[in-house]
Amino acid sequence: MDTHMTTVLLVEDNELNRDMLSRRLERMGYIVELAVDGRDGVEKTKRLMPDLVLMDINMPVLDGWQALRLLKDDPQTRHIPVIALTAHAMTSDRDKADEIGFNDYATKPVDFPALVHMIEAWLGRAVGNPEHVEPARDGT
Amino acid sequence: MTLRHYRISGRVRKLPIRIKLSLLSVLVVLSLSSILYLSWYRDASLREMNETRTALMSMDKMLLSLERSENNFVNLFDNRHRDEFSETFEKFVSSTENLKIRFWSLGLPIATLERLVELTSEYRYLFEIMAEQLTKIGQNGKEGLRGELTDALAKTEASLQHIPTDENTRIALHRRVIILQLFTKDLLLHKDTTHVERFQSNFDTLMMDVANAVPESPERTDLVGNLHNYQAIFLNLAETVQQIGLDFDHGLRGKIAWTVAQSHQSIRSMTAQVNAAIERQEVHLNIIIGTLAGLFSLLFLIALMFLGRSISTPIREVTDIMTRLADGNLTVQIPDQPRRDEIGDMLRALRVFKMGAIIRRRTQEELRTAHNELENRVEERTRELSEEIQERKRAESALLAAREQAESANKAKSMFIANMSHELRTPLNAIIGYSEMLKEDTVDLGYSSISDDLDKIHSAGRHLLGIINEILDLSKIEAGRIDLSIDYFAVQDVVDTVCGTVRPLIAANNNTFEIICNPDVGDMQTDLTRLRQILFNFLSNAAKFTTDGKITLSAVREPDIEGDSLVFTVSDTGIGMSKDQLDVVFEPFTQADTSTTRKYGGTGLGLTVNREFARLMGGEVMVKSAPDEGSTFTVRLPAVLNANDVEHDHEHPDTQNGIKS
């Protein structure tokens, strides 16, 4: 897949994690946009219309749940796949992610090749038929 | 009051109410049936009268047909009409007989009918006579008097031929004889007696002419004889005709006409009588029925009124007594005169009730006294007791407060650890991520000497993260923060998944791996992720402590009345554990010894987490081991875990945001 034209918005409050993950993604050929908290993430999603959003859950101002709800309630951004980045996924978090409508989730520390695989699957899914492809969910 | 009592007791031994009601219903039934019967009778008699009127009309018609037959017989002289007359007459007679019976049953005057019978018998009689006379006359010129007349004429004409005289005289005489014959025809045709006188005068003239013109001779004597004979027959005929009556005013025919007219008259008068009777009967019966209905209704109302009063008044009074008794007024007098009806029964019952009430009241008063005494004693004792209880409660609440304090301190500790773990983890993620990134760079750039060191940083980070995660799990369990998520799945599937994950780990130490899982192990309902974690922990543990050996995983369903269990067993042929080690193997931070940690790695919390998860899921973990003989870890879980079986700790404040994970 041609990743040069693909824009990924990374919403992450921790500077080190943001830097590390963005650089690794850029190295894979994605255009990476950054947001520092939930509100920033929602605004940038609406403005930049990325192909995919990676969203941390624990963030100041607006947390990942609230930010996702805003994105999924807006018909303009509803179609953009959002992958949750959770630390040490607890059952409750995972269920909540499913319930609220995250398209997928990855556990931190991210298994980078798996994350890339997941992103590719969702992007393929976004242009193809989203109902019939089940990307790998097991991030560990 | 006295008046009421008098009424209630009543000197008369009253009839029971149900009998009164029965009598009333009998009255209603009787009146209704009599009115119905009268209506039926009215309709029936009116129908009867109408039939009578129709019968009278048909008799009038029969009379007319009798007249027709009579006329036909007279004019056509055909015996058929005579028979017809007789037949109709028979019918007429039987009709009159029927009518007579109807008249009797309807109570109509029978005199006119009897008159009619007389008149019609007369009619018949006259008709018979007339028929005889007509027969005597004969219809044509061959029978009866008319036949004789024809013969006499023929003889006269023959003797006229033989008389000694000239031709002219003979012709003149013959003309006169023919004139005589014309009178006969006129007589029969017109039935007029003037023709008889004219016949006589012409006959006299003819006789004189004979005497004058015909010389004395035997032939003349013969002619005269024949002529007299003719005359005699004619006169006989004339007399008979006269008897019959030449018109409807005279003779038999006159009589017949009168009789018939009288008959018609009497039928008409009878019809009028019947009509009048119909009208009278209808009005009469309607009046009777109306009066009867009114009378019965009135009677019924009066009876009902009396019955109502005779029932309701005593009932009201009984109710009065009962109300007062119920109010507790036991001095009410209950009249004791015997009555046979239900009121009497009620009064008797009331008397019994009153007696009972009096006894009850007396007993109640005694009881109340005893009760009051008892109550006083109880109150006293209660006061004493409550003081004791107060004392105890104070002690108890102090204890509770102490316990709550201890619990909340413990939870605060767990919370602190949970938060701390999160804070530790975030930089650790950066360390792991960057070390991975650097390793990628070194591989790309060919700095293989740094690569190993980076690996060490990376795996140390991973290890530290594992410890932190397990601490976090444990502290969450202790803080009551673990929520189970109930899934329904095939046991075979979870075994396959876990084995797929651990297979590389097991293979790394040159171990073989056996999986014993019958297809009939079936499905399970519990927290899938936790189960997976438990199995993974046991298996990775076994892989860690076993080299060149064998690791076995078995899943077995154990049926039970209270619900099946699933038993997962992980056994290895590894280093095993001593008895002392076994005792603390599930306690936190107690890896067999510190040297093992260095040699084998691991957090020392995996087994503790497993035990806690198994407990949460309603099950247990067990271990069997001996040094150098390997270890066998077993987890037994209920096959079906319901959401409401799961323990929840709701006492903890702020369950939503307390721990960031």
Image: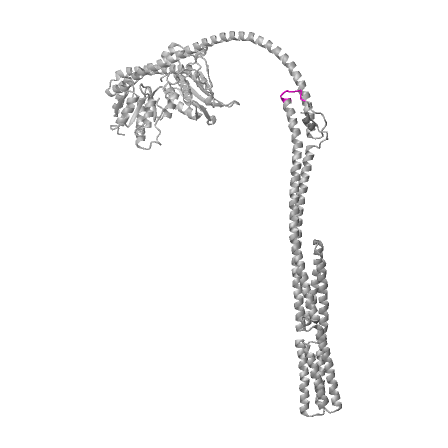
Looking at this view, name the residue that lies furthest to the left.
B445
Q: Residue at x 68, y 18 (%)?
A: B359
Measured along the vertical axis of the image, is residue B349 above or below residue B421?
below
Relative to B133, B520 lies left or right: left
Q: Position of residue B485 (x, y in %)?
A: 42, 22
Q: Nearer the viewer, residue B235 or A11?
A: B235
Q: Quadrant of the rendered structure where residue B355 is?
A: top right
Q: Is residue A126 magenta?
A: no
Q: How many marks?
A: 0
B327 within the magenta span: yes
Segment tinted magenta in the rendering: B325-332
The colour scheme used to paint the residues is one colour
Question: Looking at this view, is B276 or B441 the one in front?
Answer: B276
Which of the image's four quarters has the N terminus of chain B?
top right
Q: In the depicted view, which residue is nearer to us: A114 or B67? A: B67
Q: Is residue A58 left or right of residue B615?
A: left
Locate residue B285, reporting x and y percent. 66, 49
The residue positioned 67% from the left and 84% from the top of the image is: B178
> Is B110 situated above or below A117?
below
Q: Please tell me whether residue A15 is drawn above or below residue B184 in the rendered image.
A: above
Q: Where is residue B142, by image quadrant?
A: bottom right
Q: Quadrant of the C terminus of chain B?
A: top left
Residue A120 x, y percent position in the rendering: 30, 28
Relative vertical location of residue B347 with respect to residue B186 in this rendering, above or below: above
Whether residue B596 is visible, yes or no, is yes
Evaluate whether residue A121 shows in this view. no
Give how far across and how far down residue A83 sits, in percent.
Answer: 32, 25
Q: Main secondary structure of the magenta part?
A: loop
